Image (tube, rainbow, N blue to C red):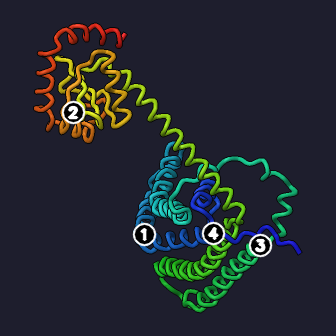
Amino acid sequence: MAETEQDQKTEQPSEKRLYDAMERGQFAKSPEFSLAVMLAAVLGVLALTTQTASRDIAEYSVTMFSRFASTPISRDTVPAELGGVLLTIGHALLPLLVGCAGAALLAGGLQSGFQLTPKATTFKLESLNPVAGLGRIFTQAALVKAGIDLLKFLAVGSVLYLDARALLADPLFSAPIEAAYLGEFLSHATLVFLSRLLLAMSLIAALSYGYEKFKTARELKMTREEVKEERRGSEGDSHMKAAMRRMARRLMQKQMLSAVATADVVVTNPTHFAVALKYERGKDQAPIVLAKGENRFAQRIRALAAEHGVPTVENKPVARLLFAVGQVGEAIPADLYQAVAEILAVVYRAHRYYFHRLKARRLEASA
């Protein structure tokens, strides 16, 4: 019997496959995990703010009811009273809303590794295909999801049943109590219910997220053919990058050779290195490296310098240092100012006629 496609996926996913999957939103994500984090946030906020919110609501209620006898009911007073009620309730609910929003963001970030997934939000026409939708209903993942939903139903039902039994034994239902006890009873009952529900949902979330992690890792596995194909593609990319680097190097060499004709001087090794320099008074703060090369490219620089009558000076240590630390298009390092200044002084005295023509040549090159 032929192997299924999933059985053929025996190789661990590559970095590229994992990156592409993350961009598509294909990572382990569990709604139960998000629900558990939000329940924890709700429980924490209620534990911290219930007393303060209850006191504020009680104080406003006392103030509002005490004014009823002296406040006429009209179109002007009713909106003001309703506004005060909404403001008080909103002030009490705001920490809860902020906590839920923060918990939702935190849960999503923890599951996605706080990475953006732009492709996950794009609309896909295949999601509207009813045949594909029916196919997704009768899958292993759908059965597992149904089992998790059943666990959630049983968890909520069990917590409600156990809490109801415990609450019915409270004196509230069998003896007269003070009115203030009712608030304490509701606060305590709510916190106990949420605590037990959070514990149950945390266990279910651990099972759900563990399964999603396993399922995602299994889906992202690669066949040997896919690994070979991706390796061939990455090698092709490396060849393309190498070709682009060679092209960029050739373009830079072409630009350097074209600039040799406007240089003040070419400093040579004499055979291994050649560096072309220019210095325009009033424009350049220091001599600029126009071109540099070694071995065969240095010979081309020297040949062009001879063709255009550019002065050439042999200075082995200066040429070696200029080639090692000088950057094409930038000024020479400050440590070489004195040595290069001495070379230029000699060249200016010995080749005055060349520099008289050089101004016109530079104007022609910049036009």
Asked if disc 2 and disc 3 are in contact, CB closer than 8 Å, the reply is no
Nearest to N terminus: mark 2 or mark 1? 1
- Between 295 and 115, the residue placed more toward the observer is 295
* 34 sits left or right of 287 in the view: right
Nearest to N terminus: mark 4 or mark 2? 4
Q: Where residue 110 sits: x, y (%)? A: 52, 66
Kind of residue at badge 4: Gln
Asked if disc 2 and disc 1 are in contact, CB closer than 8 Å, the reply is no
User: In the picture, residue 155 is in which quadrant?
Assistant: bottom right
Asked if disc 4 and disc 2 are in contact, CB closer than 8 Å, the reply is no
Q: Which residue is mark 3?
A: 7
Q: Where residue 341 sits: x, y (%)? A: 12, 27
Q: Which residue is mark 1?
A: 49
Q: Secondary structure at mark 4?
A: loop
Q: Residue at x 58, y 68 (%)?
A: 34
User: What is the CA distance from the residue labelled 2 to the residue labelled 1?
Assistant: 67 Å
| Crowd tier of the residue under label 2, counting other residues whose Cα lies within 10 Å: few below 14, some 14–19, many 20 or above | some
Q: Is residue 349 visible?
A: yes
Q: Which mark is residue 332?
A: 2
| Crowd tier of the residue under label 1, counting other residues whose Cα lies within 10 Å: few below 14, some 14–19, many 20 or above | some
User: In the picture, residue 356 is in which quadrant?
Assistant: top left
Q: Which residue is mark 4?
A: 12
* 133 sits left or right of 341 in the view: right
Q: Secondary structure at mark 2?
A: loop
Kind of residue at badge 1: Thr
25 above or below 182?
above
Nearest to N terminus: mark 1 or mark 4? 4
